[in-house]
Image (cartoon, grey):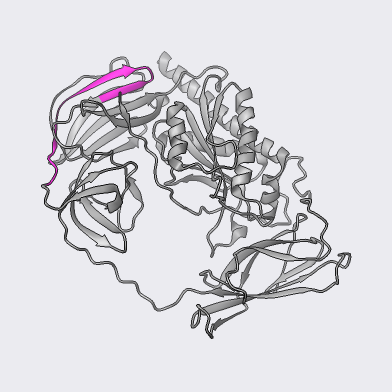
Amino acid sequence: MLKRSIIFFLPFIILVSLTGCSLQTPFIKKNISYDTPVKSPTVQTPSLNLVYPNEIESDSIVHISSLDSVFLFGNVTHPGGELIIGAEKISIHNSGAWLAWVGFEEVTELSGDSLFDKRPAGKISIKYHPPSTAQANGTSIERNLWFLMPPTGIEYAKPELLPQNARLEVIEEPAPIRCGWPGTYDLFPLKGTQLWSDGFKDLGRRFYRVILGDGEIGWIEDKYVSVDTLGSPPANSIIHFVTSTVKDRSTEIRLPLNGDLPPYRVERTADDKLELTLYGAMSWTDVIIQPADSRVVREVRWRQIDPDTYRLTAFIRPEWMWGWDVSIDKTGAFIWSIKEAPEIKRNPLKGLTILIDPGHGGTNVGAISPTGADEKQVTLALAEVVKPELERAGAKVIMTRNSDISVGLGERIALALDNQADIVISLHYNALPQGKNPFNHHGTSVHYNHKHSLEFAGTVLKNINTAVGWKGNGLRYQDLAIPRLTFCPSILIENGFLLHPNEDTYAQNEESRKVVARGIKAGIKQWLKDLRKRQESSQTN
């Protein structure tokens, strides 16, 4: 049995930019009443609710770093009233939701016994006048909020590099090697990989600096490795020969290792070129048995990059490239599997297995809207519409969750592997970090990581934007867990975002979700049909 390398990764919280629009401007072309007020129980006394940011003290100090402007959102119980934040009159959506981006009226230094004593803070005042028709005492609501500002003049010293030669062994997967300090994820070595460290930095957590190829280094956290400070550097694996065989839709390239298991990198360097780099390997390669029957791999060649870095290049046919995976077999050989695209039928979705991943769930609520809706709720509601839409087109659809439960990233990706998913789509709604003007960000964005998912992502984005009728927030390369899947095309869709009252209401509207689902289906079908044309053309040439 092959030991599959499950290329899934740690939760990586990345707040993604969104795209905005004026609350007064309808941006949905479809004949859908997205302005329908959200029904709520009759309220006798008007109230003003601040949903974001959360206040953390009774004296209305909001613990948040900002520069000179902030955004905040919430809702009122009587939408017909007047809301003034700072010096600006804020539009109130029919649902009662509101969103504001305002500057500070004044900046001062907080004083007293507060935890935040001697910190600069900006003041924002809020005034809400309920409509005269409100069944209440007619009193206005006024509040002052103080936003903590970043301290100035503070320099953070870089941590000292402490020499510590050590032999490391990866003891669990995923075990990300970062590209720098602190750096983003770069490599994901297999369990049992041997590494050599020449030092570490310590900031409460210990990161070992590891040597890769000539001039290349990385950083790995100590919890992923066992440490032997008396051990010798890993021995280079000697690659004597390479064989290639075709099994079902996979072309398996096998490299018997005569030495320690090295870290690796797989990279699509051109449309027709996929490269495997082994850091800690040397060529004695005399023979490479080529995959003569493969539709995806034309030829395999080797090259020694430096004395410790060995590279295999697979020259591929792009129209048949679907993904790749790596594993170690029971003999200890390194297996590089390059997956062939399915034969696309005239009904392109028929027979495909698609994994739909409603983001978040359980204790992980995700983003929150001005009306109090959680991202975990609306992603599941959207998935429940997307699933039958794809099934009617002939696909087999697997859901990572069917209810409000917590599902880890590893569990989600294991489901894709166990069900041999042909396509993976993760559904989300977007959020913004403080300090960005939300009115400059709105709409759908689609995120990919690997080149074999690029065209898929772009085609789905185009079709969603056409279906919904907005410009959208663009196609984005990003280091996210689901798009990092390598064995099949995989994308993450941010379906607008909840902080805009219009898009919040749109996300909660059943007919609107059907429009988005049809856009997703149309994007998948168009991408597959285009791929089918290229496959047919390659077979006739």
At x 63% / y 39%, what residue is drawn?
A: 382
Task: State which quarter of the image contains the N terminus.
Answer: top left
Question: To which quarter of the image does residue 235 belong?
Answer: top left
Left or right: residue 113 versus residue 249 is: right
Task: Point out the stretch of residues depicted in magenta.
Answer: 233-253
| Residue 539: % across, % down | 41, 15
Q: Check residue 238 for magenta coloring.
A: yes
* Relative height, residue 202 to residue 154 (above, below): above
Say whether residue 196 is left or right of residue 39: left
Residue 513: x %, y % from top left: 67, 39
Q: Nearer the viewer, residue 100 or 424?
A: 424
Up-down relation of residue 532 to residue 50 (above or below): above
Query: In terms of image quadrants, where is residue 131?
Result: bottom right
Residue 168: x %, y % from top left: 20, 47
Asked whether 110 or 213 is in front, the reply is 110
The vertical placement of 31 against 272, above or below, is: below
Residue in the picture at 48% in, 25% down: 531
Which residue is drawn at the image coordinates 82% and 74% (left, top)? 139
Which is the main secondary structure of the residues drawn in magenta? strand
**Is any part of residue 221 visible from this angle?**
no
Q: Quadrant of residue 384?
A: top right
Asked if the stretch drawn in magenta spans residue 87, the answer is no
Q: Position of residue 227 (x, y in %)?
A: 20, 50
Q: Is residue 141 left or right of residue 157?
A: right
Foreground pick, 299 / 252: 252
Foreground residue among 406 and 377:
406
Q: Quadrant of the C terminus?
A: top left
Q: Tell me if residue 422 comes above or below residue 137 in the rendering.
A: above
Left or right of 64, for residue 260: left
Query: How many labels sit on residues?
Result: 0
Residue 165 seen from this side: yes
